[in-house]
Structure formats: structure tokens, C-alpha cells
Amino acid sequence: MSDGGLNLDDFGDLIERPSARLRRSAEERRARTGLAPGALGRLDEVGGWLAAAQGRVPVTPLERPRAVVFAGDHGVAALGVSARAPGSAVTLVRALLDGTSPGAVLARQLGVPVRVIDMSLDCPPEDLPGDVTRYRVRRGSGRLDVEDSLTAEEAEAAFRAGMAVADEEADAGTDLLVLGDLSVGGTTAASVLIGALCGTDASVVTGRGGEPIDDLAWMRKCAAIRDGLRRARPVLGDQLRLLAAVGGADLTAMTGFLLQCAVRRTPVLLDGVVATASALVGQRVAFRAPDWWLAGQASGEPAQGKALDRMAMDPLLDHGVTVGDAVGALLALPLVRAAAALAAELPEREGESAPPVAPSAGGGEPEPAVIADAT
């Protein structure tokens, strides 16, 4: 990034699309397996996405996925917009760390390590392990309906923290990242971001949250989102200011994380509305970035549906999982693993044919048995 400060415009230059040439090569290899077109449904599509992201045909089976969960408390929760008490996200984090939350159970069953990143939990940092709190930028985010969630300095620190986590995972050889969140008030912040970026009214993006709220709480949440939208619209042209105004530290970090994953050519499986809101902001920063992300599930939150439509993403699952904790994306992970295994291991059948692969820019030499793009 720029030496003098964080310049989000740099991402537009740094992020390239996954290889369209290798996606075509993966499709042609699939045609030579002898299976009828469409017989594997969306698994073929996901296999092609992985080939393009990995820069390799055949695809390499997924061996080192990791779930990364960003956590924070949001000041707007004080308005009673959540079924949980304000400032109580730390209890969710402790359950994940103790192995007793839904996400922890699924991750354990799938053999996926989980990393928790505290960005703005409302508790003393010494209450949690140092590796969880090392990137925290503040204790709780500001109340987005009447004040900025973050200062400009805090927003930059949170964004850079997300980038740093992405770099650490890429350097460690993680081959697929599962992105989730744990927060109280986070769906309200996500809905404001999505409503602002999609140009919709508050009522269109106001959902019931991770633990469904009653009608009175829904009305309070809708009013908070309406007020947040009034504060968000004047800064729509500056994505970092937008995140500082209404996003909070966790969503800001998740946006930096997603964009840096795209820079590092590391594919990401998205969970629910909070991850999707960060992805939508990331798309506004760098329009090619969403090609590196896959929507794991449709949570049923109306704001998530709006954002997925805007990014032309079709989620793998539609089970209405709203619990957060990366649960919906973890449920989709076996499908992605299955697609990788099929794309890697299905043999080509003698006598089967496929359209010829277009020659590379270097000339008309035949493609080798394993095709890989330099990265």
C-alpha cells in the first residue's frame, strides 16, 4: 500500500481476477471424464472456481482450510436491537474458545482449526488469551446512529489488522479461509452498510438478527438503521470513512482481510450477513475482488440477500443459519472439499474429447498434463 497512509485505491491495481484460462482448462478436463454435463451440479462450478483460484489444473485437494472469526461489540446494541445484552459478545467468544459453541463443534468435526480475532470486545483484554486480543483497536465500537463507530485512526488500524491476518494465513499455507463473526449489534451495522451501498430504505434491510428479536426490538433496530443510513450516505464515496462512521472495528477488519486475501490469491468462503456486508464494501473498493470469494450460505437476513444480489453471488446452501460463529460457511465447507476432490481425482477417459485449449500468450505449445499459472 502507499507509504504515506492507507490508500484503498491501491487494491484496484493489486487484485487480479482468478485465471479464466485455467477455469476453461478445468471445464475441458471435466468434459473428458465421461460424466454427463451437469451431472455434478454446482460441484463443477466450484471445482472450476478453485482451479482458477489455485492457478492449477487438476485442482489440488483442500488440505489446510482454517476458520477465522472476527469479534466485536457494537454501541448500537444499547438501544435494544439485539436479543443479547449489550457488550456480551465475549460470552460467545469464550464458548468458541472452550469448544462448546456450534461453530466449535462443527469445526472440530470437520478437522478445521479456528482462529478468533478480538477487534472491539467490551471486556478487559486480560480476560482473553493474548493471541486473541493482539489486534484489538478499542473496547466496543461507537453508537452508529449518533456518532462514528471508530475514529479515522482506529479505522485504519482495524483495516490493517485484517490485512495482517490475511497475510499471516497466506504465509502459513492456508488453502481456503472460512470467514465468520461473533458480535452483539453486528447485524445492525452490517445492515446499515448494505442499505447505504444498495440505496435501500431501512425497512428493506432490517432483519431479526442472529437470535431472532420480537417486533418491538425489530422496530428499534429499524430506527437505528434509518439513523445510521443518514450518517452513512454523506461518506459513501470513501469506503474507509464509511466503515469508520457505521461499520465498527470488526467489519472494518473483515473488509481489510477480504481484500488482502484477494491480493494474496487465497480463496474465502463467506458466512452470513456480517461477512457479506464486508465483502460488499470490498467490492466497492476493488471490483475484481469478489471473484476470490464464495458465498457459503443464505442466512435469510434480508440485507444479506440484497448484498449477494448486488455481487451476483449464489450461495451454496440455504438453511437460514443466523447464529454466526462461521456455522453456515462451515456447513458449506464439505461441499467445497468434495468439489476439490472430484476436480482433482476424477480420471479422464480414453476416447473422450473436449474443445481444444486455446494456446497461451507465448505461442501454440501444447498444454502440459498439469497446468499452472505463475503467481
Image: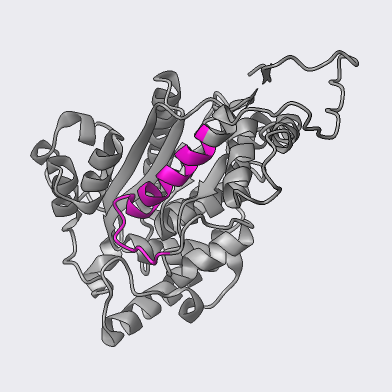
148 in magenta: no
Task: Name the one closer to the observer, 193 or 276.
Answer: 276
Between residue 357 and residue 83, name the one nearer to us: 357
Q: Position of residue 211 (x, y in %)?
A: 26, 69
Residue that extends furthest to the front in the rendered view of this protein = 351
Task: Give the answer, above or below, for where 127 lies relative to 236.
Answer: above
Say which residue appears at 43% left-offset and 52% top-offset: 275
Q: Which corner quadrant of the image does residue 133 belong to?
A: top left
- Image point (21%, 29%), residue name: 131
Residue that sits furthest to the left in the current view: 127
Please give left or right for residue 134 compared with residue 145 in the image.
Answer: left
Residue closer to the observer: 299 or 29: 29
Residue 313 falls in image quadrant:
bottom right
Q: Is residue 47 visible?
A: yes
The quarter in which the N terminus is drawn is top right
Q: Is residue 98 above or below residue 321?
A: above
State the predominant SS element of the stretch in magenta: helix
Q: Is residue 328 magenta?
A: yes
Using residue 340 as the reference point, say whether residue 130 is left or right of it: left
Residue 42 drawn at (x, y percent):
59, 51
Q: Is residue 228 above or below residue 370?
A: below
Q: Is residue 288 above or below residue 141?
A: above
> Which of 128/370 is in front?
370
Q: Quadrant of the C terminus?
A: top right
Q: Residue at x 47, y 77 (%)?
A: 202
Q: Position of residue 78 (x, y in %)?
A: 22, 69
The residues colored magenta run 319-341
Which quarter of the picture shows residue 28? Answer: top right
Measuring from the top left, give residue 177's x and y in whole percent: 43, 36
The residue under the point 30% across, 39% down is 110
